[in-house]
Every structure is written in structure tokens, then in C-alpha cells.
Image (cartoon, rainbow, N blue to C red):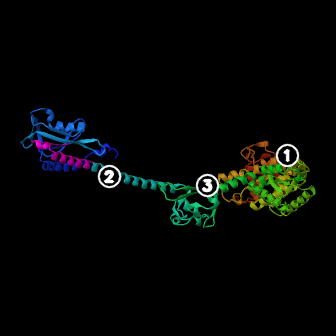
């Protein structure tokens, strides 16, 4: 038996009470005067049980015959003691005042189960019979009784400790199991524990979410209902098990009960005995990351606006196809005419729509094996392997015909084309591109002008539909401006520019909403800011067309005031171009005499007075004087 720990050797109080009763029996059965049980206690033993209460021990002879000393000697030497001291008896006085004379002693050491001394059991007699064989044998039996008692004490303590530990372990295990399940339930990966037949015995919340089931409803279901593989003796059959064992993880596709396709990453693991009885299947939903990966791969080789291939992809394909069997290879450039004008006039959304429409025309016109890409900006490049130049001519015809089909739309699609042919491998893409671009630019000079003219007509039509800037307003302004210009002796070139400016001065209003243009009440600061931008927008639109570039700056300054408080630049006096000053005045006069949703109509006389009142602030004073004279001489049918 292993050595008892110190805390195992503590004697319960009730045991001492039982021993106190036992020593009374020993004294009776062995017919002795004094029975002592002493316990080793550091350097000096102590009495833990005796048949009488001893008040004092007096020795008339050698003090070594003192019962306490003899008991200590038994403990110290660990040997039985048998001694007679009749010549020098020991006298004891009990608590009741009785005197007891002792002449012999017999004692045994008492041991713990591990052999360590507990103490001593000794008896003292007033006669010589205290050392007899009967007394010795009887005392030895009682000594065995006490040692058995000590063994039971140790065993009882050990059992209690073991029981306590088991309870503590069980409690800790339950807590760990609870913590374990809470942890497993908190992770985003699905976890299924299954038995040898593949029946699910545990499922976490994530497993239910991924499989679109309540986690409690998964208990008792078989894995085969969700994963199309079977289990034999706790092993997954066929290639699934081998794949999992070989790669540790396996991508697996499932279809949920709502018809959703999910891609899972599976991992198999044995159960941990402390917590489980079966095996575990861990799985993670990687559908989104897979789709994201595909999306990223797609975006790396595609243009996000048109979904055509991008320049990077085309350059890689050009290298791949630079082999003899792919010759001849043609490169076709298609440039969208008027894109800048569309962006400046209608906004980038309309420009994006034009690019998408152009992409659709190219896809509709090309063969399946042709590689169509958006090169950048308004340029598309088509790579045509194993294609002769006469075949490309047919493709160009199809593109032109499909473009013509859009001529009645808001703005027609026009593509300038240029082709270059590579007869043998080795020529770089940039060299071939340059050849094709040179041919495209030659064609663009002829085609771009008509496209811009069409777009400009669409702009003026849009402006007329959105606001009160009618064709009549433009014609009246033309007539008035022309007469004033003639009276001032302007050249024919300036008169022509003045007439064109009368038509196009508010071109920039095409990008302003109808709600703002026709608002009857005061404009908000935000709305007024948009209104003030229309000269700049008109300037950009006119600058983008060769036909109207010469009046772009006149459009920019037609809302500047003579005193410098106008917009957008705040210039003053003669810094403002003369033609812009004329248009500013006749525009204001026509608006006053015809009325607007935000302004009541005035008579000719009232409008003339208003012009004179604003002379020197908003208008050129000299021009106002000239215009007043013209109004007296000419009837403009206002």
C-alpha cells in the first residue's frame, strides 16, 4: 500500500471517542490498572485515550518507569516493551484522588498502514500478572484492532477523496463539455459529429445555417442526406476518404433544400474521447470566396463597363497567337466618334451607354472566335487570327450596317475603323496597332464631323423640350443681334458668329434638369450653383466641335456683367467680348418681353426702361443706347 499522506492521517474525533470506550474494555478483559494509547506528536507523545483520568503521576523510583516515558520509549524505538519495576513502583493519583501503585508494564508500538509509527498501546498493572502470556497475547490482539482501525480511517479518507475528485472531475468535465459545445456553436465553420453508421449525433449552429436546417433537426439524420457519400465502419467510402486523408481538406459542392448551390471545404477528424464518441466532419462555406475569386479573375481580364476583354488580356492573347499557324492575323481598331461631346453634353452616364451600345454592335458583327477588347477610352481593338484582309473588309461592312441601324436613336453610334495585317510571326502588337490607328484616323476626319453635327442637333432639341428656350426665342435673338451688329458696323464674319451665338448661347443648359430650368419660385443656393455652371458646360461642348469652336469663348462669357459681378469668371467692362455683351442684352430683353415661369411678361417700353436702369451695372451703357434707338426704328414682332 502506498504511503498515506499527512492529511490522510488525521484521526476524526468520533474515532477517539470509540477508542476511549475500547480502553475500558481492555482494562476489564486484561485485568490491568492503566491502559494508555499515546499518539506521536512531534518530539513528545500525547495521550489520546486512557481508562482512567490521571491527575498526576508520581514516581518514587527511577523516572524512566513513568508510564508517559515508557509510552514515548515504545514510539521512539518502535519495539514492544515488557518491564517489571516492582522494586521501585510508580504511584499515580487519579482525578478522584485515588492512589494507584503500578509495578509492571507491557506495550506495543501502533503503526499506520504504511509502517509509520502512529503511537503506542501500553498497559500497567499493580501486580506481576501484567506481564503474563495471556495479557501479552490479548494486548497484541487489541494492537491489531487499532491498526486495522487506522487502516480503515486511511481507506475511508482515500475513498472520500476519490469520491470528491470524481465528483470534481465530473463537474469539470460537464463544464468543459458545455464550454466545448458553446465554443463549437460560436464558430462560423459547420461541425457535425457522427457515429459508425454515419448518423449525426451533434451539430453546431453554423452547420444548421449552412445546410439550411435547424441544428436540433439534424440530430439523428444520416450524412448521406446532405453529402452524397456513404460510410462503412466509420470510414467514408471511395475517393472521398482517400482525398480527405491525402489532402486533409476537400472542396465539395452541395445543393441545399432551397436549391442554392454551395461550395464547402471539408475536413475529417477523429473524436476526442474526453468529449465525444464518434468522428467529426468540419466544413466551411467557401461559396462567396470562390465566387469572389472567379469575379476577380474575370475582372482582371475584362472591362467592367462593356464586359469585353480588356487591353491586358488582348496583349496576352496576341503573344499566344504569334505563331505561324495563326497567320495571317488582322488587328482592327474601332473608335467611337463623338464620345467626348456626348460626355460633355449629356453626362458620363450617356457616354457609358454609347460605349455599351458600340460594344454590342461589335459583338453582333464579329465571329465567335474573334477577340474583342476595349483598349481604353473610346477605342476598341479586335484581334482576328487566321483572317485575310478581304475577310476583315466584310466585317467592317457588317459593323457599318449595324451602326446605320441606330441613326434614328437619341444619338447614333458611329465607329471609325482602321485595319492592319500581320503576315508572319514576330511583329509586336504596338507596331501593328500604330498601322491600324493611322488608317482609322484617316477615316475619322470624314466621319466625326457628321456625328458631332447630329449630336448638336439632339442637344438643341433636348434644350427646347426641357425649357422655354424655344426656336422662336433663338430666331428673335438672331434678328435683334444682327440689326444691332449691323448698326454698329460689325463685319460679316462677326455677324455670322453673332447669329450662331444667338442659337447656341444656352447650350450648356442641356445637362440641367427641367425641374430647375422651369422652377416658378426662387432657386436654392445648390440649384443656382448648377445654373451658373451652364456657360462653362456650353464652352466645353462647343470646344469639342470644329464647327463651333470659334464661338466657345463667346458662350463662356455671355453672363458676365459690365460691373464685374457676373459669372462664371467675374470679368468686367470691355474685357467681356463684344458679341457676348450684345447677346447678354438681347437675351434679357426677349425674356422680359415674352415672359418665363419665374418672370412675368413686360411691355416693350417696360423692358426698355429696365435695360436703361441696368446700364452700367449689368449691361454695356453704349450698347443699351444703341439698342434703344434700334427698338424705336425696327419692329421685331415681339
Q: Residue 547 bears which disc, if any? A: none
Tally of numbered tags: 3
Q: Nearer the viewer, mark 3 or mark 1?
A: 3
Q: Nearer the viewer, mark 2 or mark 1?
A: 2
Q: Residue 430 bears which disc, if any? A: 1
Q: Are marks 3 and 2 in contact (CB under 8 Å)?
A: no
Image quadrant of residue 637? bottom right
Between the C-alphas of marks 3 and 1, the distance is 51 Å
Residue interval drawn in magenta: 121-150
Dot 2 falls on a residue whose secondary structure is helix
Between the C-alphas of marks 3 and 2, the distance is 47 Å
Between 467 and 87, the one nearer to me in the picture: 87
Name the residue that disc number 3 marks.
Answer: 245
Tag 1 or tag 3, which sits nearer the N-term? 3
Residue at the image position 14 percent from the left and 35 percent from the top = 65
Magenta highlight on residue 132: yes
**Residue 235: x, y in percent?**
58, 60
**Residue 155: x, y in percent?**
30, 50
Dot 1 falls on a residue whose secondary structure is helix
- The residue carrying pointer 2 sits among few (fewer than 14), some (14 to 19) or many (20 or more) residues within 10 Å by Cα, namely few
Residue at the image position 68 percent from the left and 52 percent from the top = 528
Dot 3 falls on a residue whose secondary structure is helix
Looking at the image, residue 126 sits to the left or right of residue 300; the answer is: left
Return the residue found at the far top.
62
Return the residue found at the far front.
133
Between 192 and 140, the one nearer to me in the picture: 140
Looking at the image, residue 53 sits to the left or right of residue 152; the answer is: left
Looking at the image, residue 171 sits to the left or right of residue 611; the answer is: left
Tag 1 or tag 2, which sits nearer the N-term? 2
Name the residue that disc number 2 marks.
Answer: 160
In the rendered image, the vertical position of residue 626 relative to residue 196, given as above or below: above
Amino acid at each position: 500500500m502506498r504511503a498515506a499522506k499527512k492529511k490522510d492521517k488525521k484521526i476524526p474525533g468520533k474515532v477517539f471517542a470509540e477508542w476511549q470506550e475500547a480502553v475500558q474494555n481492555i482494562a476489564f478483559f486484561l485485568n490491568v490498572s492503566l491502559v494508555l494509547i499515546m499518539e506521536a506528536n512531534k518530539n513528545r507523545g500525547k495521550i489520546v485515550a486512557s481508562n482512567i483520568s490521571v491527575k498526576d503521576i508520581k514516581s518514587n523510583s527511577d523516572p524512566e518507569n513513568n508510564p508517559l516515558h515508557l509510552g514515548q520509549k515504545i514510539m521512539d524505538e518502535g519495539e514492544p516493551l515488557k518491564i517489571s519495576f516492582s522494586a521501585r513502583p510508580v504511584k499515580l493519583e487519579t482525578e478522584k484522588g485515588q492512589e494507584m501503585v503500578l509495578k509492571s508494564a507491557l506495550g506495543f508500538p501502533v503503526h499506520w498502514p504504511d509502517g509509520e509509527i502512529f503511537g503506542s498501546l501500553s498497559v500497567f498493572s499493580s501486580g506481576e500478572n501484567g506481564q503474563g502470556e495471556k495479557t501479552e497475547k490479548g494486548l497484541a490482539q487489541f494492537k491489531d484492532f487499532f491498526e486495522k482501525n487506522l487502516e480503515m480511517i486511511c481507506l475511508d479518507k482515500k475513498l472520500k477523496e476519490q469520491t470528491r475528485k470524481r465528483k470534481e472531475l465530473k463537474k469539470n468535465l460537464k463544464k468543459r463539455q458545455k464550454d466545448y459545445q458553446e465554443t463549437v456553436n460560436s464558430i462560423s465553420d459547420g461541425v457535425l459529429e457522427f457515429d459508425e453508421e454515419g448518423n449525426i449525433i451533434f451539430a453546431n449552429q453554423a452547420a444548421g445555417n449552412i445546410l439550411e436546417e435547424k441544428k436540433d433537426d439534424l440530430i439523428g439524420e444520416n450524412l448521406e442526406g446532405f453529402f452524397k457519400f456513404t460510410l462503412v465502419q466509420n470510414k467514408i467510402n471511395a475517393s472521398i476518404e482517400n482525398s480527405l486523408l491525402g489532402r486533409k481538406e476537400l472542396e465539395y459542392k452541395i445543393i441545399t433544400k432551397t436549391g442554392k448551390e454551395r461550395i464547402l471545404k471539408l475536413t475529417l477528424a477523429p473524436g476526442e474521447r474526453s468529449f465525444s464518441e464518434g468522428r467529426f466532419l468540419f466544413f466551411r462555406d467557401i461559396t462567396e470566396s470562390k465566387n469572389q475569386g472567379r469575379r476577380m479573375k474575370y475582372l482582371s481580364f475584362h472591362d467592367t463597363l462593356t464586359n469585353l476583354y480588356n487591353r491586358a488580356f488582348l496583349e496576352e492573347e496576341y503573344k499566344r497567337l504569334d505563331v505561324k499557324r495563326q497567320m495571317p492575323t488582322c488587328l482592327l481598331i474601332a473608335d467611337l466618334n463623338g464620345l467626348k461631346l456626348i460626355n460633355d453634353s449629356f453626362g458620363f452616364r450617356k457616354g457609358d451607354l454609347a460605349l455599351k451600345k458600340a460594344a454590342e454592335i461589335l459583338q453582333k458583327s464579329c465571329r465567335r472566335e474573334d477577340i474583342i477588347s476595349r483598349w481604353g477610352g473610346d477605342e476598341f481593338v479586335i484581334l482576328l487570327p487566321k483572317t485575310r484582309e478581304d475577310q476583315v473588309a466584310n466585317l467592317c461592312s457588317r459593323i457599318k450596317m449595324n451602326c446605320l441601324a441606330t441613326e434614328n436613336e437619341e444619338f447614333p453610334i458611329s465607329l471609325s475603323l482602321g485595319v492592319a495585317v500581320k503576315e508572319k510571326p514576330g511583329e509586336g502588337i504596338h507596331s501593328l496597332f500604330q498601322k491600324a490607328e493611322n488608317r482609322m484616323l484617316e477615316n475619322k476626319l470624314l466621319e466625326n464631323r457628321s456625328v458631332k453635327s447630329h449630336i448638336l442637333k439632339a442637344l438643341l432639341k433636348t434644350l427646347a423640350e426641357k425649357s422655354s428656350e424655344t426656336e422662336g426665342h433663338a430666331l428673335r435673338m438672331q434678328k435683334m443681334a444682327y440689326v444691332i451688329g449691323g448698326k454698329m458696323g460689325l463685319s460679316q464674319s462677326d455677324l455670322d458668329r453673332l447669329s450662331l451665338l444667338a442659337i447656341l448661347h444656352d447650350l450648356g443648359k442641356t445637362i440641367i434638369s427641367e425641374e430647375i430650368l422651369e422652377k416658378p419660385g426662387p432657386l436654392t443656393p445648390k440649384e443656382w450653383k448648377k445654373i451658373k455652371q451652364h456657360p462653362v458646360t456650353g464652352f466645353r461642348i462647343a470646344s469639342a466641335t470644329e464647327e463651333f469652336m470659334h464661338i466657345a469663348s463667346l458662350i463662356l462669357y455671355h453672363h458676365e456683367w459690365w460691373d464685374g459681378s457676373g459669372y462664371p469668371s467675374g470679368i468686367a467692362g470691355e474685357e467681356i467680348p463684344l458679341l457676348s455683351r450684345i447677346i447678354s442684352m438681347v437675351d434679357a430683353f426677349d425674356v422680359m418681353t415674352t415672359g418665363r415661369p419665374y418672370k412675368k411678361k413686360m411691355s416693350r417700353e417696360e423692358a426698355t426702361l429696365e435695360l436703361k436702369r441696368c446700364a452700367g451695372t449689368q449691361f454695356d451703357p453704349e450698347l443699351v443706347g444703341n439698342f434703344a434707338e434700334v427698338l424705336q426704328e425696327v419692329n421685331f414682332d415681339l
